[in-house]
Amino acid sequence: MVDQASTQANIKVYGADWCADCIRAKDILATHGVEYEYLDTDHSENHDAMLALTDGKDEIPTLVFPDGKVVQNPDNAKLNSLLGLKPVTSVNFHDLIIIGAGPAALSAAIYTTREDIDTLLFERGVIGGLAAVTDMIDNYPGFAQGIEGLTLADNLREQAERFGAVIELGEVTKIINEGEFKRVETTSGDMRARAILIATGSDYKKIGVPGELEYYARGVHYCATCDGAFYRDKRLVVVGGGNSAVQEAMFLTRFAAHIDLLVRSTIKASEVLQHDLQKHVDAGKITVHLGTQTNEIVGEDKKVTKVIGTNTKTGETIDFPTDGVFVFVGLSPNSQFLVKSEIKLDEIGFILTDQHLQTQMPGVFAAGDIRSGATMQIASATGEGATAALKIREFLEGYPHPVQN
Amino acid sequence: MAKNITIFTTNTCAYCVMVKKWLTSKGHAYEEVNLDTNPERQAEAMQLSGAMTVPVTVVTKNDDTQEVIVGFNLAKLAPAVA
């Protein structure tokens, strides 16, 4: 399991007996049989010697490596990598690593595993992604009566796993171009793959108003299927006017006594959803407030009590007394981990790809909600996943792009 | 190993599925309290977590200390049951 540990003798560890991170670092060294010299910084001569090495930066543990490299308080992954303590089995090399396990990722995996392309998926949240947290999906083809998001997610997972896809629960933090193999840094250690598919999708956006952060999960929510049950017979405000806002507002009527739907301009949801919404309006369960800007979420004693809005035409301020707020005002890309990479993003943070769904880094592809220009539909995501899988196969087989059809 | 694990869930919550799936994959047994079928235990979940959300996972360790994990948060869940 350990390769180069024996070459790393004479590491110096400056630390103190009371310092938890020092104990952690020493534990890692000891566990792997790495020799080290411990210098207690509670003795001033050791402390002074350390500060001389760190330009006065006072942080422990400070590790000094035989080659003179000085590192302060590395996390476990960093320390392991500094020590060369990587498992050297071939298990960490894959044909394809897919980042994400939503509809685009799982569809791609169904295709690649059927082609015997060794495929590992990473999921940091929910298998099935946003589709899994959606109550009911009525526009995904092939399910005449609609399908519950959780069921669709589970079916996709089962189908991909049937052909050999492996889903690892963890997060990818970085992609590094090392030529034939791309290295990905993950919470399960470093992995390498010939090709990578980024299918990290999107997440519900915050409104960005006072009170939103303060009452997060304590009155302000972004997942109706998770948190709706806490509002049995209560009053709710739902913010947004797209498909998600309307769909989730209707879902919430099974709990809430009444819902105020605050829509900044006009309803953008599909005609069918608007028709369904009207039934809830007629039944007195939902009141729609068009042209209403959400300005502030106000609470007392750690509980939300009202939302303050403005009528965008008259400028009139309106209070909406409520017990909670659900926010569905659009989607933001899960691309934070790419911000400093050579993979190009558009101005909002979605990934730019060519007509082969390939990003600026050769061998790295993107599909689904995360791709710039995506239509944020599950049917599109699964389609793009399949397309990406075929393009990845071409890439792995060494076809130069563009491939002539 | 944890002495006891209790998860507060609802029928529709995907993150609850993930917590249960992960615990099962690591060989941990748990007790599930479904708040859709046991709404009277909602206040208990809120008091433990300080939040109006599920999943709430309560890990009782061998020394009888408790750790409460809100949401599907592997960074907290994994060390809590280790």
Image (cartoon, coloured by chain):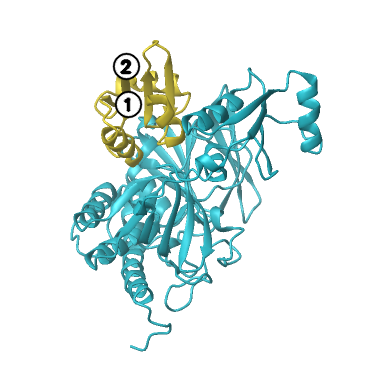
Asked whether the viewer can see residue A264, the reply is: no
Looking at the figure, which quarter contains the N terminus of chain A? top left
Q: In the image shown, does A300 or A69 lie closer to the viewer?
A: A69
Task: Name the secondary structure under disc 1.
Answer: strand
Q: To which residue does mark 2 refer? A: B3
Amino acid at circle 1: Ile
Foreground mark, 2 or 1, reads 2
Judged left or right of residue A357, residue A177 is right
Judged left or right of residue A37, residue A155 is left
Looking at the picture, how far across and down is residue A111, in whole percent? 26, 66
Q: In the image shown, does B14 or A127 lie closer to the viewer?
A: A127
Question: Chain B rendered in what hue?
Answer: yellow
Instruction: Locate residue A255: give its quadrant.
Output: top left
Judged left or right of residue A120, residue A343 is right
Looking at the picture, how far across and down is residue A227, in whole percent? 39, 35
Q: Residues within 10 Å of mark 2 (few under 14, many from 20)?
A: some
Q: To which residue does mark 1 refer? A: B7
Instruction: Locate residue A93: give its quadrant.
Output: bottom left
Task: Name the secondary structure under disc 2.
Answer: loop
Q: How crowded is mark 1: few (under 14 residues within 10 Å), some or many (20 or more)?
A: many
Q: Which residue is drawn at 51% across and 32% down?
A: A28
Q: The cyan chain is which one?
A: A
Looking at the picture, how far across and down is residue B55, in whole percent? 37, 32
Q: Relative to A270, is A251 above or below?
A: above
Q: In the image shown, does A176 or A379 lie closer to the viewer?
A: A176
Looking at the figure, which quarter contains the C terminus of chain A? bottom left
What chain letter is assigned to the residue under label 1? B
Q: Distance between the residues labelled 2 and 1?
A: 14 Å
Amino acid at circle 2: Lys
Q: Which residue is drawn at 37% across and 34% down?
A: A257
